[in-house]
Amino acid sequence: MRCSAKHGYAHIALLSAVLLMPLHAHSASDTIDQHASTVKPEFIFKTKDNLQGLVDQAITTAQKDNTLLLLVLGAQWCHDSRGLAAQFSSDPLHSIITARFETLFVDVAYYNDLRWLTEQFGYPGYFATPSVMVIDPHSHVLLNRSSMPLWNQADSVSQEEYQRYFATVGENAHSDSALPQETRERLLSLSKQPTERLFTGLAKLSPMLRDAIENDPEDLSQLRALSNELYEFRIQLQKDIIARYESALSEPDKAMPFPDYGPFSWEIDDASQ
């Protein structure tokens, strides 16, 4: 999202901290102007033409350079996304990122549906901004599924943890690569239905969020209620997906249906129309 000149980052910070607390927990260390002034251009979330082509190019470059593919899905209005970008821009972490990864920042705007992208790497969607995906560029296997929730609140992670994580992630991968391809495909198929329900809700939230950031409306009660409901669902769903992959490592043939989530307000509203 490109912040309007009328409201600027200060308005977004207030909205994020006061109204969207569950979506992006506010950190006392978050200083948006500092983030904006120190971030390298390649770590700014902005709309890109031909995103699939850029992903394909990043995969090819990673293969050629013998590095890992690092996809970061986030938004410029999200302070955790900007916090991660600021960390990536600072040394010594920047040197680690440059040496070990071919990195592509993907702008999700106001929760755009990018399942078509994440599913290419065996992941049914994204459940937070930022979402950090470390991928083997040869097999397209996701290497950090179990540790992805760490980056849900990226601005609260210490510099030391950033450096430790990105210096080692993917080396001794406790990852999807340990599962048979058939099992990975089955788990992805199972997770698609609840993830579709999530993105149906995010599609309802998207215009409310855009309006809140760009127009500063007085009544934000609907936005708060829906964002809280979606927060509870998306965090639980992310945990349940990870748990099923972890279980499959020891019992790959075990049936692992998902819980009967909901009913959710956006589904009840649609049913009543």
Image (cartoon, rainbow, N blue to C red):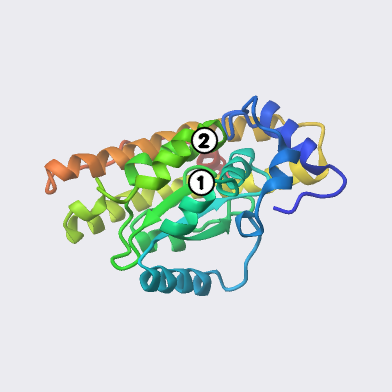
Q: Residue 14: image x %, image y %?
A: 74, 31
Instruction: Measure how far apart labels 2 and 1 are at the Cα level.
Output: 8 Å
Q: Residues within 10 Å of mark 1 (few under 14, many from 20)?
A: some
186 to the left or right of 112: left
Question: In the displayed structure, does residue 43 sit left or right of residue 255?
Answer: right
Q: Secondary structure at mark 1?
A: helix
Disc tally is 2
Question: Which residue is disc 1 drawn over?
Answer: 93
Q: Give the amino acid at mark 1.
A: Leu
Q: Can you say whether 121 is above or below 208 in the image?
A: below
Residues marked 2 and 1 touching at CB (< 8 Å) = yes
Badge 2 crowding class, 10 Å Cα cut-off, few under 14, some 14 to 19, many 20 or more, is: some
Nearer to us in this view, 204 or 42 = 42
Nearest to the observer: residue 63 or residue 251: 63
Q: Residue 159: which numbered mark, if any?
A: 2
Location of residue 7 with respect to 62 vertically, above or below = above
Percent x, y of residue 129: 54, 44
Residue, x 69% and y 53% (percent of image)? 1
Q: Is residue 55 left or right of residue 5?
A: left
Amino acid at circle 2: Gln
Can the viewer see residue 194 in this picture? no
